[in-house]
Image: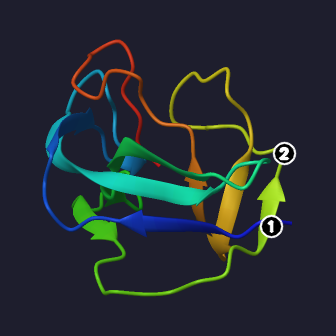
Amino acid sequence: MRNVKMVVGDMKVGQAITWAYPYGDPSMQTYTIPTYHLAVSGTGSKGARKEQKFEIIRFGVQKKSTTATPTIVGLAEAQTHVIKQWIPTYTVHSSHSTENGAWQIYGNFLIHDGPDNPMGLRDIYAS
């Protein structure tokens, strides 16, 4: 297996619309949050170095119950992790996605499909 490095940037590169997961209502209340770059690098099958950047949602809005106040959640500190596993059966549960599967960082912190249009009102993710 080839090594792959994923680095989440700390500079805002755009914005996304989200809702307070899991007890918020995307039809009633949405939030605008910053997006960041995720740089994925490694070597291809012929040994050439490859890198691709993705615009990602790094922080989310969480609402733990129907009466709770929404709060910002996510990992902010610089960290290094070895990916635990690929979960091929994972499906995005806060929006519609045809791209199943997720990389498990640890616990329920996952890297998975996100919105193709982060500011689009038809494709609002909140995980």
Q: Position of residue 83 (x, y in %)?
A: 69, 73
Q: Which residue is mark 1?
A: 85
Position of residue 52 in the picture relative to residue 98 (left or right): left
Question: Quick one: 107 or 4, which is closer to the camera?
Answer: 4
Q: Is residue 16 above or below residue 108?
A: above
Residue at image x 69%, y 66%? 104
**In the rendering, which numbered label is found on residue 88?**
2
Quadrant into which the N terminus falls: bottom right
Q: Quadrant of residue 92?
A: top right
Residue at image x 13%, y 54%? 12
Name the residue type under label 1. Gln
Residue at image x 47%, y 49%? 127
**In the rendering, which numbered label is found on residue 15?**
none
Question: Quick one: 100 or 122, which is closer to the camera?
Answer: 100
Q: Quadrant of residue 124?
A: top left
Position of residue 39 in the picture relative to residue 119 (left or right): right
State the separation of the CA atoms marked 1 and 2: 9 Å
- Residue at disc 1, secondary structure: strand
Residue at image x 39%, y 19%? 123
Name the residue type under label 2. Pro
Residue placed furthest toward the top: 122
Q: Position of residue 99 (x, y in %)?
A: 67, 28
Count of labels shown? 2
Position of residue 90 in the picture relative to residue 99 (left or right): right
- Residue at disc 2, secondary structure: loop
Q: Position of residue 88 (x, y in %)?
A: 84, 45
Whether the residues at callouts 1 and 2 have beta carbons within 8 Å, the answer is no
Q: Is residue 113 above or below residue 28?
A: below
